[in-house]
Image: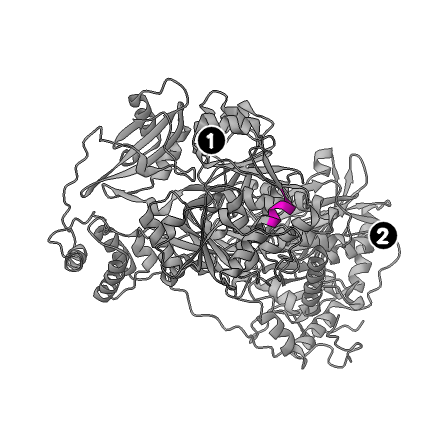
Amino acid sequence: MLETDVGYRLSPLQRHAWQGRGTGTGYSAAVFALDAPLTPDALAARLQRLAAELEILRVELVQVDGLREPVQYVRETARCHVVAGRLATEAEADADVDTLVDAWLDCSASRQANLAVALLDAATGPRHLLLRAPTWIADDAALALLAQALAASEPFVADTQYIDIAEWMHDVLESPVAEAGRAFWSSLNADAAHAARLPFARHAASSSVTPARRNYRVESGVTGPVEPELQALLAWHGVLSRWCGVGALDLTLFDHGRRFDELATVIGPVARAIPLRCDTCGLTAADSAARMADALAQARRHQEYFDPALPLPVHGYQWRTSGGNGGARWRGDSGLAIMPGQLVLRAGIDAGAWMLEFVFDARCFSASDIDVLAEQMRSALLQAPLAGYTPLCGPAVTPARPVSADALFDACVAGFPHAPAVRSGQTVLDYAALDHQVGRIADALLDLGVRHGDRIALVLPRDAACIAAMLAALRCGVAYVPLDPDAPTQRLADILAEASPRVLVHAGATDRWASLDGMATLDVTRLPARAEAAVRPSRIAVDPLQIAYVIYTSGSTGRPKGVEVSHQAVCHYVQAIEQRLGLEASASLSALSTWTADLGYTALYGALLTGRCFDIVPSDTVLDPARLSLHLAQHPVDCLKIVPSHLAALLEVPGGEAVLPRQCLVLGGEAAAPALLARLRERRPDLRVINHYGPTETTIGVATHEAQGAPHHAGLPIGRALGRLRLHVLDAQLQPCPVGVIGELYIAGAGVAQGYLSRPDLTAERFLPEPVSGEDAPGTRMYRSGDRARYWPNGALQLLGRADDQVKIRGHRVEPGEVAAVLGRLPGVGAAVVVAQEAGADAWLAAYLVPTGAVRPGDAALLAQLHTCLPAHMVPSALVWMQQLPVTANGKVDRRALPPASRQRGSGRAVVAPRTSREHDIAAIWTALLGVDEVSVEDNFFDCGGHSLLLVQLKARLDAAFGREMPIVTLFQATTIAAQARFYDASSAPATGQGASTAEHDMARRAEKARAALQRQREVRTDG
């Protein structure tokens, strides 16, 4: 080797390490177990020979005038340090690498050396070889090579010096193909997939990092059709995708960088951190593995062109090999140098078991957070071999080609013609008989001229004919609108006027509908006979995106709104809930809610589109506890869907346990009180209890949680998303809320409805673009649920009442749902609902309570307990005890049927006059817009006669007056003069802490290229 005093420029990886962009210890360290004897003298001699062979061990960084970075000078003498010692105890021998470094290689000589080595005798077992080097000298693979060289008796021969590799790296970046390589990486930066964050990650403002590590061992599971590296990567990507609510998610791939044979034995930093993007949601196992393998190959193929100064995703992955052989076996290392807020999984295999090490910023993640992720990884890895790989962004329930709901029913008819489909008391229809009824109604509808895309109204009682009419509509490619025959005539008329159905289907009520203009009617009790051998009408090709049904729900403006749900959304739900419930193929299902709402469709379509049996409970039986108990005792079902308050009332009746199903109880429609859950656990410990959540606008259900063990004091969480659905808890700016912080729940994915029928304004208000695109991108929408929610530290999602039930009490915002939740946890309270009572400009809370037993708690004692956990303005002014809460036909609490309540203590509120000039200005705008003489700064805008349209005008006037824009979402929350003044005062404050101008990115590189006479021995290679 030629001696030279010429300085050589740093490689891009060395420059990155020298600049300190990767925060951490600044060194790499690893410990190895030696298989062969090695004395300190022999080690020193081998190290001296190794340093003579390897220039990297004799390099010194020297700062040269005029250069922005140092250059490498190769000296004649080695820059190494050797110590020897003894590990006296087993605890010392088992200590982690950082502890060993602190004990043996933390002196000045070790810190200044290019390589520091400690030879440590152990009390038992083999000797330890501890190596430490700056990150610009060696990466983990280089340390393993050095350990092997020191453990071997034969001299080490360097095929290539690292300085040559450094120049090759620069040549690659300056080659004609480099621009295409850089373009590949620029396409992955600065978008949602790159910036995705775990919802429970805490924000850390400073640029420092507190690195921490947690290790886990997962026995078994290291099998399957894909390589272990790919299997672990797929599992980790799926866990993160589900948490972040995105399909396409970027990871930081910590790659060894030695993809060329020429780099395999190079001593120096070659490992790279590069972005990796892949979207596996909704794919089959084989397609998921193939897509991830391709993404991995693409990233590695272009890795030389990635600028290490560019931002990287906060979630990372590294595959660890055994890291050492040839006499030096790897035992541990110092870990990765992570960035602030980063979380990295290092996966590997040891003795047939998965080894998982999480390296993370302890300021952003707690140990319990990592435990949750580790458990999810364990589940993913153990289930992966069963079917190759199961995507974790949602179970693989979506068929390869979307199907329509009628196609699923037809498949059941073809596959199980004689299996029971519908049971009503003693009458049972098998799938063939039900299909015959469906065909008769479909024939009649087609004869009446229904066409693809029409709507029909179903005004039918709860019976088999109604079910047949639903399925007939699906078969004909028309959307049905289910209506309650007992609903007020005017309400029915209003809905019919908006829905404009071509046909109204009824059951013997011809006179009631005779006066309808422009609408045909069909009486299902007078259908023409259909011969058994009759040829069915030609199949109508139904587009999966076509509307299957329109369900009307109450509207905040007093006008019902019709939710349009597609065939595809129904099929997605049915397939997802079937997988989640895991019922036997012969199971029977039932629901007690009205069929004019979709709450009962969990059982109805969950049975009839999967080949199971649906049990009809007569309408006059549902709300009669005695008759219902008798009916279900005589006709038990395996799975029952019911509203919790309805179930609580039923269980109070003697013999009420008869309503409970044999296998699975699905609770939905409202939160389940802890007292109810405890009662169920006591009376039927064998019963599976599933908490089911989902607004109509997201097709029946979006998440489930199976209750296990003692109920949590805060009630049941809503659990995991179904299928290809994503749950976001967002703040007013549509940014993810950290763990524990309350936000609003938004739902995105395959189950989101098309919108509201003939209500484009309301559709635009509630169905918003998803900030982070998922697997349905582009154009992915999310539904604003109006439910307040937060993540628990263990990853569970908890609901906290409705955002739109918020009231103002003495200037404070109060959520009645939160008060009801607290009441429900108090001893003696079986059920609770809290309602805001309006009395002019005053507002107060009334609590309606059902005791758990015959003796109810005293009001004074209950209020005293409330005062211990709630501020005074959130304590109800009235407690009204009832035997049971009134419920609607759908089984939910009927607030309109609650008796009047009177306050039990006075609560007056005087007008608070404006106190600042800004409050005076805002008050003047209010009085002019609302047409009133006087307002209080603590008055609610809506209490004073305001509404959404006036709120838009208010926003325009306020923004014009103060020259600052208040987001409309903020204005919906800041509904008092005082709150609006605070917003504009804060937004008008001068900005502070402006950052310094950006430093120049490119540095002058004027030093001559080292070894200019040295011809490149190998061509630059740009493919894998």
Q: How far is disc 2 from disc 1 in space, using C-alphas? A: 68 Å
Q: Residue at x 33, y 35 (%)?
A: 834
Residue 29 higher or lower than 171, as above or below: above
Q: Residue at x 54, y 29 (%)?
A: 632
Q: Which mark is residue 647?
A: 1
SS of the residue at dot 1?
A: helix
Taken as a whole, is the magenta stretch helix, strand or loop?
helix
Residue 93 painted magenta: no
Q: Which residue is mark 2?
A: 326
Q: Is residue 72 above or below residue 785?
A: below
Please state which of residues 601 and 261 is positioned toward the viewer in this rendering: 601
Q: Which residues are magenta?
A: 430-436
Among numbered discs 2 and 1, the one appearing first in the sequence: 2
Give the image's coloring scheme. Answer: one colour
Q: Nearer the viewer, residue 1005 or 745?
A: 745
Residue situated in front as seen by the camera: 825 or 320: 825
| Quadrant where the image shows the C terminus | bottom right
- Disc 2 marks a residue whose amino acid type is Gly
